[in-house]
Image (cartoon, grey):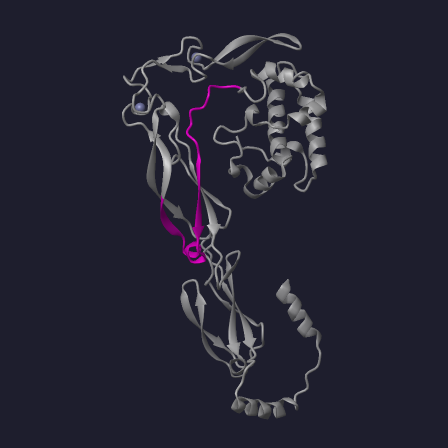
Amino acid sequence: MQKRDYYEILGVSRDADADTIKKEYRKLAMKYHPDKNPDNKEAEEMFKEASEAYEILSDPEKRQRYDQFGHDADHFGAGGFSWDNFTRHADINDIFGDGFSSIFEGLFGGGFGGGRAGGRRSNRGEDLQIELSLSLKEISTGVEKKIKISTKEACDKCNGSGSEDGEVETCTQCRGSGQVYTVRQSLFGQMQVMGECPSCRGEGKIIKNRCSKCHGEGRMGKVKEINVKIPAGVEDGQYIRMRGQGNAGPRGGAKGDILVLIREKIDDVFVRDGNNILIEYPISVSQAVLGGEVMVPTLSGKVKMKIPAGTQNRRVFRLKDMGIKSLNSYSKGDQLVEIVVVIPTKISKDETNLYKQIAEYDTKRELKPDRRFFSRLRNYFS
Ligand SMILES: [Zn+2]
Ligand SMILES: [Zn+2]
């Protein structure tokens, strides 16, 4: 099932302030609170979902990360949110009073900080995150990179089982389920609750003779080289997920992923605007007046560009398809070349004389203030 948006879960807008978020969480918590919904799994899930959303949205830093990356940010690691991750106890007590955490202790076994709700402990390996800095040129065409990374791989001695002799027994206490019922005293009397099996610590299996190489872990540290394929058009802050390339899980658990975080290097010349590339190109006064040809740098080398006679300062020329290839389609961005007419500040005597001659012609041309200049300036900044 698709993971729901945190804002949607709490029913708040994306720009909701902290007070609104707390208020809406309070409403949901009151509604789905386990004491009001005894034996109602669905309510319990709704409550957990709301608490997960609240955990993220009530923390400015986590919220900002969520706004940027959504659920891709993997806020709680591979296993997803569990009550271990919940840190807003003060707010809970604030809402329900002190009796509340006792209810939880009963429900989730061990309470906050120690408990684990539902299911056998996941043996999936951890996701690993690496950062990759790319130049605009690499981004414009796509690139393949070899990267060394420290991972955990299945132990070659025991084939990842963690057992010296290959023998793994099913836990007799929980019969392999990883969970057992225990009776607990809570504020509301005796409760039978499901909790992690103490014999196998929730794994459902027991190894008698631990592998001597990996000490029963079933995996070993290893530096490996991976090939990362970056498609053209990626943006700073995006993740590329390489499934099954992360850490091997302990004792034969599934492999985690590698998350490659894309960083875009600042370029000295080019500025990126979506898939378009912007550049300022300087020309001389005489080039502006007389026109000519210039060689303009692009991401794929220099190209010839015509400057028409009478080119104004800040005029923008478009070099079609010279930008960045789109990530999601076959289209390409353009390069926009903005002309900057450079007025010389140091000129020779000869040049001064020539400019004086030109000045005589200039006096015959009348320059008037004009709205057009203003609107052009405005267009430039908008
Ligand atoms: Zn081993
Ligand atoms: Zn067990």
**Looking at the image, which residue is at 61% across and 20% down?**
44
Residue 356, horizontal then vertical, whole percent: 59, 91
In terms of depth relative to the viewer, which is nearer, 38 or 199?
199
| 103 shown above or below 247 | above
Is residue 244 shown to the viewer in this render? yes
Q: Quadrant of the C terminus?
A: bottom right
Is residue 328 shown to the viewer in this render? no
Residue 122 lies within the magenta run: yes
Q: Ligand 2: which quarter?
A: top left
**Looking at the image, which residue is at 38% across and 25% down?**
250
Asked which quadrant contains residue 103, the reply is top right
**Looking at the image, which residue is at 38% across and 52% down?**
143
| 120 shown above or below 303 | above
Residue 207, horizontal then vertical, whole percent: 35, 15
Left or right: residue 157 versus residue 87 is: left
Residue 300 lies within the magenta run: no
Residues shaded magenta: 118-147
| 350 shown above or below 142 | below
Task: Count up the numbered dots.
Answer: 0
Residue 74, horizontal then vertical, whole percent: 51, 35
Left or right: residue 71 versus residue 222 is: right
**Looking at the image, which residue is at 41% across and 36% down?**
243
Left or right: residue 55 versus residue 242 is: right
Asked which quadrant contains residue 381, the reply is bottom right
Residue 121, horizontal then vertical, whole percent: 46, 21
